[in-house]
Amino acid sequence: MNRYTVVLVPAADADVWTERIAEQPGILGIQELPADGTEMFRPDTAHHFVRFDQKREFFDWLRRETWRRGDAIRLKIWHTGSLSLPGDLPIVESGTEFHRNYTRVTRRFHRGRCIGPFWVGPPWREPRAEKIPILIEPGSAFGLGDHPTTQMCLTMLTAHRRARDVLDFGAGTGILALAARRWFGHCRLHLVEPDRQSAREIRHNFKLNHITPPRRIHSSLPAGAFDLVLANVYLDALCHLLAALTHGIRSRLRPGGYLIVSGLLGADQRDEFISFAPTRGWRVTQQGYRADWFALELTQGNHALIFRASPKCSPLRH
Ligand SMILES: C[S@@+](CC[C@H](N)C(=O)[O-])C[C@H]1O[C@@H](n2cnc3c(N)ncnc32)[C@H](O)[C@@H]1O
């Protein structure tokens, strides 16, 4: 049994508070919850809010994302005993509860899998000889290759043969960047990952794959021109990214470049993203659909936005 304390934090600064609390001694884990305290995780599989559990209400809850857009969210903090909190955060609940070691659970289930031409698995398993190996150490970062969004991004990037500069926006474990390096050869990798623990895991995974880790992992969109942008995040972040690339003031897609996005849950989010895509120049060239998640590939050109309403996984080549 472990002690837990639940505090209320402003939703807009939740990541900052999580970081600050995680740095305190004796912290075992922190979980984000909606302000009303609804528990949406199946405790044997979830270790982070991005891990989904197939429950209908979980999808609805994620789809609405109101818990992230509201004024406040709850942080449930597991700790070993005496907890010193930074700032003057209101404590709304405390008690004792069994806290699972999610990393241990994840290690048990991360056995290796084939995704398109890649084999993604842990360093202690033998990769499939005919596949391109990507070794990922399970930790707390998202991106073991078990999620449909990651799988669709991996498959979609292999539709391309060349890229000099690849941006992995929301890199998690670094899985997409590692796949891009393996697939395109000596491309330059640019990574964005605001979560500091994930950034540490990215460096570790690069070393596991004998690839020099990037000198800098950015916490927000870096300046530059890219041939391929991979972004498996969530609707709001994707809309901001699309806007930034559309205006191309600091960051832009090179002519003929592609943007592959995922993290869009359900047709509503896909449609919202597409309706947000300013009609100037963006067109959808591939669509993936798996377990209610969508992935899209877009490019800029002189064409109007072309989009086929079918939710099936379909290449849309024109
Ligand atoms: C769903 S995971 C994707 C991980 C990996 N790229 C994959 O495809 O499996 C999303 C990642 O984006 C990061 N993230 C969250 N908000 C972000 C933002 N506003 N900008 C960039 N990255 C963000 C999260 O920390 C998380 O690691």
Image (tube, rainbow, N blue to C red):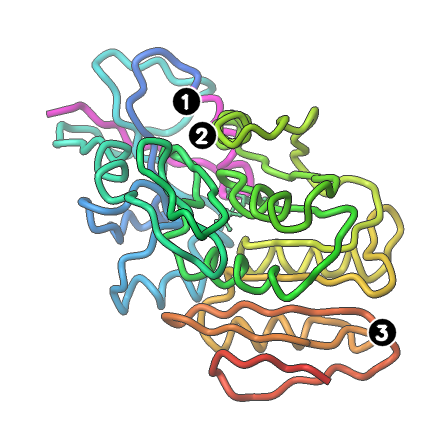
Mark 2 beta carbon near ligand 1 (under 8 Å): no
The quarter of the picture where residue 161 lies is bottom right
Residue behind mark 2 = 18
Q: At which x and y percent is residue 242?
A: 72, 60
How far apart are the alpha carbons under marks 3 and 2? Answer: 41 Å
Which contiguous range is marked in magenta? 1-22
Residue 4 is covered by the magenta coloring: yes
Q: Locate residue 318 relative to residue 179 in the image: left or right.
A: right
Q: Residue at x 27, y 46 (%)?
A: 46
Residue behind mark 3 = 301
Find residue 22 and name its label: 1
The quarter of the picture where residue 23 lies is top left
Q: Label 1 is placed on what type of residue?
A: Ala
Image quarter of the C terminus:
bottom right
Q: At which x and y percent is residue 275?
A: 67, 77
Residue 181 is covered by the magenta coloring: no
State which mark lies toward you, 3 or 1: 3
